[in-house]
Image: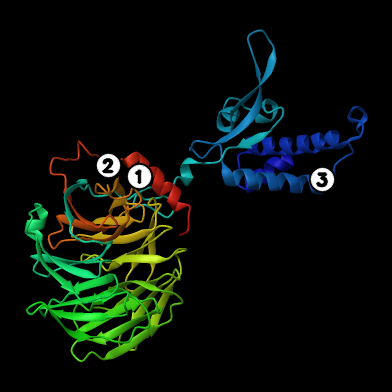
Amino acid sequence: MSTTKANSQDDGVNPSYSSLVALSARHSLKRSRILYAVDPQSAFIPSTDPTILQNSINRRKRRVTQVVHPDDGKQSNALAIVNSSNDDGGNFLQMQPLSSATAGNGNSSTALTTAFLFVLPRVYSRKKSNKGGGPGKLKIPTPDWHAPWKLSTVLSSHLGWVRSLAFDPTNDMFASGSADRTIKIWDLAKASVGASDALKLTLTGHISPVRGLAFSSRHPYLFSAGEDKMVKCWDLETNQVIRHYHGHLSGVFCLKLHPTLDLLVTGGRDAVARVWDIRTKTQVHVLAGHDNTVASLLTRSTDPQVVTGSHDTTIKLWDLAAGKCMTTLTHHQKSIRAMVEPSFENTFVSGAADCLKYWQAKDGRFLKSYTGHKAVVNAMAVNEDGVLVSGGDDGSMHFWDYKTGYNFQSSSSIVQPGSLEAENAIFCSEFDGTGTRLLTCEADKTIKIWKMDEEASELTHPIDMVAWRKKCIKESKQRY
């Protein structure tokens, strides 16, 4: 024992504590032999090789002293089973902190009869800081509060499904295209209050449903595209067609004007997007690469200047100068029928029957999925306040906070009297220039105008943070 104490002093360890470790090593060796003997009662305990025993003692000293030292003045998290006595003279085993067990007895080797050491994990020393939302902590975004929307006016003039809609840059009028092959020009102010003279003009010339409309911001022109393969340019001063753009091999389903250049982009059932020069009527590019109908388009002033969504479930970002595809996004599993881009940030949202997806516009990086709208999404629109609306094939409408994806309102369109219940599909939706009126084109041959509920407040329609937090935690475990 004196040798052990001398070695302990050389190692800088308390002598009483060193003898405790030596006793623990001997007892463990004896207990192991009894435990694994065939007959524990007659187990033979041979004399131990002093070299092996000393090595075992040194290993235990190093292991224990690295975790806790009873004389270092710090709170110990090591426990020991000690032999204690009560007032009646009986002995019993008690678990105590190692520091108190050694301090209460001058000779700790007699107090620690079993010498079992239990080291508890230092959970408090490994606590992670929650400041800054580290990688181990899910950060729940707080959505902005938006007032709910309600139906204000119903316009009924078309004789077929209303398939397209476009607003004049001055926000004085809007145009609607229908399956009755006509284009109607409406006065927005009169239509908002349901005036009987809201309809200003009806343009005829297409021989199939009109699927795309766009007003020019630099010229008094209205562009239209239909399932008759025709793309027309109307002069609103004379109300006549002044240009035709020939080239599509099948129906044209979408149409967009470039925001800064005199270019027109159209997409259709021939699985290509065609870029036209407005003035010369020449075809500048044929953006080929999709395997199915190009059903939605976005045009931007910065690269990628053209974004196409197709029924082949892919989104392509195009280099307009070279006429080549920059990136193909394959995250969707269903046909992409609608895309929308806000004016306040460089992102866009695509809608399909599986979900809505939120993308970085610069490089097409996936950011987030907006889940909950279980329908074929035909139409989407976003205003300056960050209200995103999606319209489905079953008449369902979901209103979202654009930046977070919080669904603050879910409603359903009501068909006008005389229509079938199944004729409540929403085909197109647009906000006006102020963002305070929402127009939807529907299968019951009507145009519905929605407005915000002015009586609503954060007290009457609060944000359901409990459900929103649960949804964020659930979606964080999913990849796309």
Does residue 333 sit above or below 401 in this rendering?
below
Q: Which residue is mark 1?
A: 468
Q: Earlier in the sequence, mark 3 or mark 2?
A: 3
Q: Amino acid at mark 3?
A: Pro
Q: 168 or 404, which is in the foreground?
A: 168
Q: Is residue 443 above or below residue 15?
A: below
Query: In 3D space, how far apart are the residues under numbered discs 3 and 2 (Cα atoms)?
Result: 73 Å
Q: Which residue occupies the extreme top position in the image? A: 88
Residue 123: x and y in percent read: 50, 41
Q: Residue at x 12, y 70 (%)?
A: 169
Q: Are marks 1 and 2 in contact (CB under 8 Å)?
A: yes
Seen at 58% across and 25% down, the residue is 104
How far across and how far down the image is residue 387, in percent?
23, 55
Using a 10 Å C-alpha cutoff, classify the residue at mark 3 as few (fewer than 14 neighbours), some (14 to 19) or many (20 or more).
few
Q: What amino acid type is highlighted by mark number 1?
A: Trp
* Residue 164 position (above or below residue 263): above
